Image: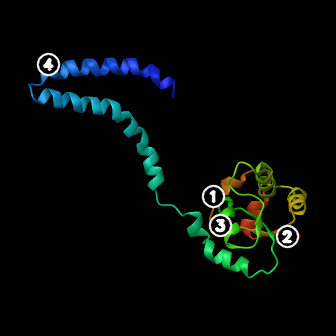
Amino acid sequence: AHASLFAAIPLAMLLGHGFERIRAQVAPPWGAGAASLFAIGVLLGPAALGTLPVWKAMTAARPTTESACPLEPIAQALNRIEAPRIILSNLADFGPPLLYRTRHAVVWTLYHRNAQGLKDELAFWSATDEAQARAVVARRGVGLVLVCRGIDPLYWRTGLASETLHERLLKGSPPEWL
């Protein structure tokens, strides 16, 4: 924020010179209007151009977690399980709705105060060693593992030298102990 203050002096000089040249070349009353359009272009143009790629990325059609794994049927299925369980899920943004709509607990949600929960989730999903994943399940008392195939697998560190547990589960080949 403070670095942008350094741009104020050259920007003011550019606007001043631009106003003078436009007023000198464009007859009144159009000169003032042209100078105002110039100022708006100089001030807002870079910001507008800078947001164009962001706008395109935000409006691009792509499947959402909710469309790939609809929450309501998941919550209904979980509510048919009588005993409350601890859920380990690759759907981090589903933590709060699962807590609200079911009687189950979750290992992690998207909140910064549960750093150990995030570490455990990452250790489980990116595990290439079954013992590491099994240790997380045992330490946390996990009773259910919820996998959505519709999320970006890069989130759970795929492409490592060995196949991750997340990749195995997406392929439908869980370890025998799970």
Quote the CA–CA distance across marks 4 and 1.
57 Å
Q: Are marks 4 and 3 in contact (CB under 8 Å)?
A: no
Marks 3, 2: nearer the viewer: 3
Please identify the quadrant where the C terminus is shown: bottom right
The amino acid on which the numbered mark 4 sits, given as a three-letter code, is Ala
Q: Which residue is labeled 2 in the image? A: 178
Q: Position of residue 72 (x, y in %)?
A: 61, 75
Dot placed on the residue nearer the N-terminal end, 2 or 1:
1
Q: Which residue is labeled 1 in the image? A: 152
Q: Which mark is residue 24?
A: 4
The amino acid on which the numbered mark 3 sits, given as a three-letter code, is Pro
Marks 3, 1: nearer the viewer: 3
Horizontally, is 73 left or right of 85 in the view? left
Task: Classify 98 as above or below 6.
Answer: below
Mark 3 burial class by Cα count in 10 Å: few <14, some 14-19, many 20+:
few
Q: Secondary structure at mark 1?
A: loop
Q: Which mark is residue 19?
A: none
Q: Position of residue 106 (x, y in %)?
A: 76, 64
Dot placed on the residue nearer the N-terminal end, 3 or 1:
3
What residue do we see at 81% from left, 57% from top?
124
Dot placed on the residue nearer the N-terminal end, 4 or 1:
4
Q: Is residue 23 visible?
A: yes
